[in-house]
Image (spheres, grey):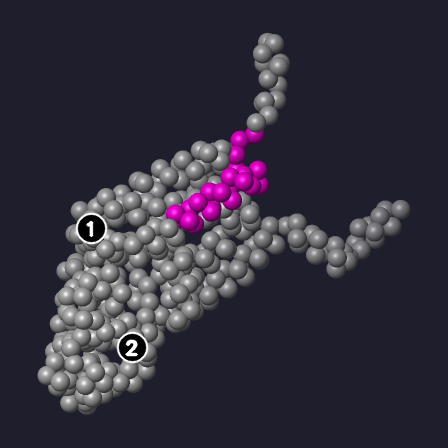
Amino acid sequence: MAHMSHGAHAQPLTRGQRWSTFRQSPFWPATVLVLILAAAAGLFAGSYTYSMADPTPHSIPTAVVGSYEEARGQAFLGGLEKALNASVKVRPYGGEAEAREAMQDQEVFAIFELRDDGRTAVLDLSSASGASVAQVLADTAPAVGKKTGVEVTVRDINPLQEGDPRGLAIFYISLAAVIIGFVGAIQLSVHARSLTPFERILFTIAYALLGGFAIAATVDWLLGALDLPFVESWLILALTMFASGMVFTMFNTLFGRWAMLPTWGLMVLLGNPSSGGAVSWPLLPSPLGAIGQWLPPGASVNAQHTAVYFQGHQHAFPFLVLGGWALLSCAVFWIWRHRHPGGRDKKPPEHAPEAAAS
């Protein structure tokens, strides 16, 4: 009998049983995470390399004033477009003042003033509009001028701040707000799991306000890298952090423990490379430049960029994008809050009657 029992126990598990055992073990989620992390690493490197490694001009809005209709001026503009292998969107303006106003409104990235029937040209750049675009034009325009017989003078009429010579500081502070925004929501979900939905939103607002203040104070007051319009920059950063945090909370409500996947994909893989912060949108692959303006990282960069370098010319659009994502995320979370893994049990604690009786 003992022999038969030993033989029964020694029977090998079937393939289905082995699979079921594996699925119930900690090795299953660990294996899934290994595969997800490997894919995420490749996608992360690929998305940033695709958008930033070799920026190529696609469409650069440019103002022209003066003798641009003369043959030499037309030859120069045509040569510039050929050299850039891009569509230089030429927009004629009645005078330099009108063209400069368009530059302040960020409708154009440069101004070509063609003089002396097209024999000379002044290229007014705005590094603050996009350092990468300004560099491309500054390198290309004089070379094209030599080939077409136009003497080109280059000026930077709206330079970057001294503490931000490459124009990347705004991208970095926006990136910090985005990442700390959703990391904060992750930490709330882990370490403050029992918060009610209303409390969770309140604490997200709290860390967004404090975090935005800390970023602005560090970059402006402590490091002196940027001279920020402090209150406006602080509130943009706070709104960015809140929107980012609520996006994770929304996905946590919809997808549970896998919420990090869509959050990372939307904010980091797609949103940050397409934000226009590291590479100006006319140099991004065209689909990214269009998509990025509708995502929180791009909206944050746009709002902050205008606040710092184009004061008095702020646009409503990036605030509507950030507010829209925040409102959508809050609405989804609130409507389906019963699905969120957090919250407190509303049932009375066990043994309460006995405790009361005693």
**Prevailing secondary structure class for the magenta stretch in the rendered image:** helix
- Report the magenta residues as a range: 322-345
Mark 1 residue crowding within 10 angstroms, few (<14) / some (14–19) / many (20+):
some
Instruction: Give the camera-side residue of 66 and 13.
Output: 66
Q: Is residue 129 above or below residue 144?
A: above
- Please indicate whether residue 45 sits to the left or right of residue 120 in the image: right
- The residue where tag 1 is placed is 228
Mark 2 residue crowding within 10 angstroms, few (<14) / some (14–19) / many (20+):
some
Across and down, in percent, residue 210 comes to 30, 40
Q: Is residue 97 visible?
A: yes
- Please indicate whether residue 208 sits to the left or right of residue 162 in the image: right
Residue at x 36% of width, y 58% of height: 298
- The residue where tag 2 is placed is 88
Across and down, in percent, residue 323 comes to 39, 47
Q: Is residue 167 above or below residue 220?
A: below
Q: Amino acid at mark 2?
A: Val
As for residue 46 lying within the magenta part, the answer is no
Residue at x 39% of width, y 53% of height: 321
Q: Amino acid at mark 1?
A: Leu
